[in-house]
Image (cartoon, helix red, strand yellow):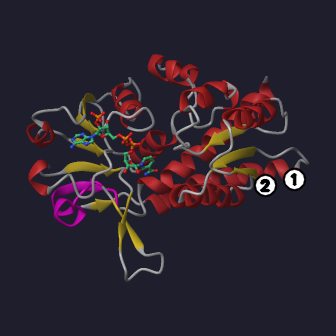
Amino acid sequence: MQLLDGKIVSQAVKNELREKTDQLKADNKRLPHLAAILIGNDGASETYVASKIKNCEEAGFKSSMYRFNTDTNEDTIIAKIEELNNDDEVDGILVQLPLPKHISEEKIINIIDPLKDVDGFHPISVGKLVQGLPTFIPATPYGVMLMLEHYKIETAGKFAVVIGRSNIVGRPMSILLSQNTNPGNCTVTLCHSRTTNLKEICLQADIIVAALGKVSFLTADMVKENAVVIDVGITRVEDATKKSGFKIKGDVDFENVAPKCSYITPVPGGVGLMTIAALLKNTYHAYIQKNNS
Ligand SMILES: NC(=O)c1ccc[n+]([C@@H]2O[C@H](COP(=O)([O-])OP(=O)(O)OC[C@H]3O[C@@H](n4cnc5c(N)ncnc54)[C@H](OP(=O)(O)O)[C@@H]3O)[C@@H](O)[C@H]2O)c1
């Protein structure tokens, strides 16, 4: 069994981007700029945004963070996004999800300029992704693809099972794995909470991507020998021994599944780090696209 190490791969991505931004600096050019909007004070969201900003710094990007109280009205957020859409110095706009209930996720996503949609959630980005056209790919599935590519994992002709059909992870993951690309060219089955024979389907899989948000859901009896297992799940579980009061757990029963796998991602230290690396890559693409237009 080999670990798919998100630390190593994300660092390689950041180093590559850092080289490019060092060159931009040397040439006295403007640097890529990510603007992040955070509404409310959800602990996990705060951690994610702080980490995205820190990683921007490591890659030599400029970043801005705009914080709003939970009860901020929708119009205020829309006005801020429009301002950022019109700001020539901003390349990527990120609105951290989930949003407070009174703010429509759909409206907010749709208002972001598709050329700055570095999360890849805008319908135009999704449409292009489905058609296999160049676009911003949602960061988590993009990060998984970068990891498969880094470790040169053979995917062509393999049977891949994705558990979870959300717009941000499972569905785009299934599309990417099925595309005529490398990595890609898998035969894909997308499973969800209404799938009746999940265990039988998983037992046939060469590659399993677990993205459902249920701690240790994928157990050893659901995985065939030598499978590749990608754990997207991130759930905070109470742990009094930790300073934070919690630990992060994935969707895979790692201890028992790992011995059966050819490759497996750890949690933490796997897909989560790749998600941020992929976001940085999208921001750099946005910057290049803007400068070439
Ligand atoms: N590593 C990262 O960077 C990263 C990024 C994003 C999300 N995540 C994590 O990934 C997990 C999934 O996130 P998400 O936003 O995709 O979640 P989500 O929107 O809640 O979607 C969960 C999906 O799992 C399916 N599901 C739930 N219970 C199931 C079951 N028993 N059997 C089969 N399928 C089941 C649901 O099916 P239905 O559609 O039928 O309800 C749904 O499609 C979470 O732990 C989240 O924190 C991690």
State the image quarter where residue 30 is shown.
top right
Q: CA distance from mark 2 to mark 1?
A: 6 Å
Q: Is residue 126 visible?
A: yes
Secondary structure at numbered mark 2: helix
Q: Residue at x 71, y 53 (%)?
A: 19
Q: Residue at x 72, y 45 (%)?
A: 34
- Residue assigned mark 2: 22
State the image quarter where residue 168 is shown.
top left
Image location of residue 257, percent across then percent down? 18, 59
130 left or right of 102 in image: left
Q: Is residue 224 visible?
A: no
Q: Is residue 234 magenta?
A: no
Q: Residue at x 25, y 48 (%)?
A: 228
Q: Residue furthest bottom?
A: 241
Above or below residue 35? Residue 135 is: above
For the residue with label 2, is its CB less than 8 Å from the closest atom of ligand 1? Answer: no
- Residue assigned mark 1: 26
Q: Amino acid at mark 2?
A: Asp
192 left or right of 221 in image: right
Q: Amino acid at mark 1?
A: Ala
Image location of residue 71, percent across then percent down? 64, 46
Q: Quadrant of ligand 1?
A: top left
Q: Is residue 262 magenta?
A: yes
Give the magenta part as a residue range: 251-266
Above or below residue 2? Residue 124 is: above
Circle 1: is it few (<14), some (14-19), or many (20+) Cα within 10 Å?
Answer: few
Give the quarter of the figure containing the C terminus: top right
Badges 2 and 1: C-beta atoms under 8 Å apart? yes
